[in-house]
Image (cartoon, rainbow, N blue to C red):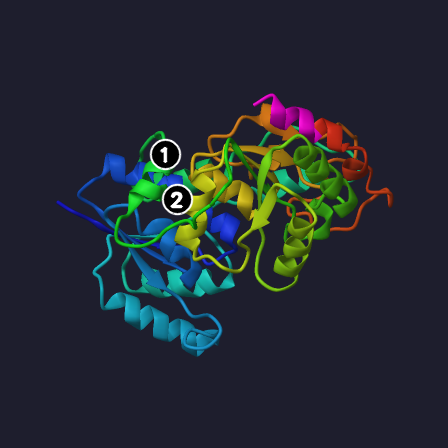
Amino acid sequence: MAKKILVFRFSALGDVAMTVPVLWSFRQKYPDHEIWFVSRPFATDLVSPIPGVHFFPVDLKVKHKGLPGLFRLFRELRQFGPWDAVVDLHSVLRTHVLTSLFKLSGTKVSKINKGRKEKKDLTRKERKIFRPLLSTQERYRQVFTNAGYPFDMVEFPGKELYGESASSEQKLSPSLGDLEGPLIGVAPFAKHQWKMWPEAKMKELMQMLDQRGYQMILFGGPGQEQEKLEDWASKLKNARTFAGQLSMSQELSLIARLSVMVSMDSANMHLASLAGTLVVSIWGATHPFAGFYGYGQSVDDAVQIDLPCRPCSVFGNKPCHRGDFACMMSISPEMVFNKIINK
């Protein structure tokens, strides 16, 4: 008999993107079951291509703000039930309130184990326990298993779901005009400064690629990032940017056309992974061992240097322990360039 599973993940773009291969794998094992995915509105284009996944947008700033808003959200979601299970992939105060309400109403609830102690051991200054932790996708999968729905992860068909041929009903990625040959995406930004390679080094890398005729698409968000990328692109012969101009589905379609994406440990690494594009990622304060590496990517394509202080944080939001940002300053443009051209 078909089941209905309610799934919560109210987080940043990269965290939500990492749920997608898990939702896909669930549906391959349980094609008759429905998932209702509750997240911020930006996530609709990420999950909507998956058959059997319904998207429910949450408005945490107005309609669903605070305790009254969470009670309202609970009442709204209950109308679409009954639910066979509630899967909490976020485990924060908001979802604790919601899962408590569902549990009181008799619904089975399963929550993620974030591995906080393991991550603290990995990132502390002294007596660091340096070992690879479970991937975020594996932690997500385990929540479904604990809810009574075990499955194995399967290959995710990103280019089929998000590429140009995925939809004939809307214009997806923009026309690239006279750009020919392999396309290299460059996504130089991240949410926290300690995850970002210094701009001077990134600009030097782009100049190296430009001088050798490589075609580049620069990725970033609207506002200051967009202005900066437009300025950089105007000074290069073989670069352009569509920052601030595309919907999420259009951006995913464009990313699917790239030969390689150069990114930080950031949302663009995860979007490129979903779109089936190889990623050369640059790592500083954070580390792939924390479990946030791009799904399906090879760690051999990560550019990083070994330092006893790395990683100093899970999210790149803590100041450099050493004060000299050696983890990023020691990565040269040549190191990244050589990774790209050898792909």
Percent from the top left, x then y, of residue 128? 74, 33
Where on the picture, by quarter, is residue 141? top left
Q: Quadrant of the N terminus?
A: top left
Mark 1 packing: few (<14 Cα in 10 Å), some, or many (20+)?
A: some
Closer to the camera in the image, 19 or 236? 236
- In whole angstroms, how far apart are the C-alphas of marks 2 and 1? 9 Å
* Mark 2 / mark 1, whichever is N-terminal: 2
Which label was assigned to residue 112?
none
* Label 2 sits on residue: 20
Where on the picture, by quarter, is residue 115? top right
Furthest-top residue in view? 342
Give the residue type that dot 2 points to. Answer: Val
* Element marked by disc 1: loop
Give the residue type that dot 1 points to. Answer: Phe
Magenta: main secondary structure equals helix
Closer to the camera in the image, 167 or 106? 167
Q: Quadrant of the C terminus?
A: top right
Does the rendering let one see residue 283?
no
* Label 1 sits on residue: 156
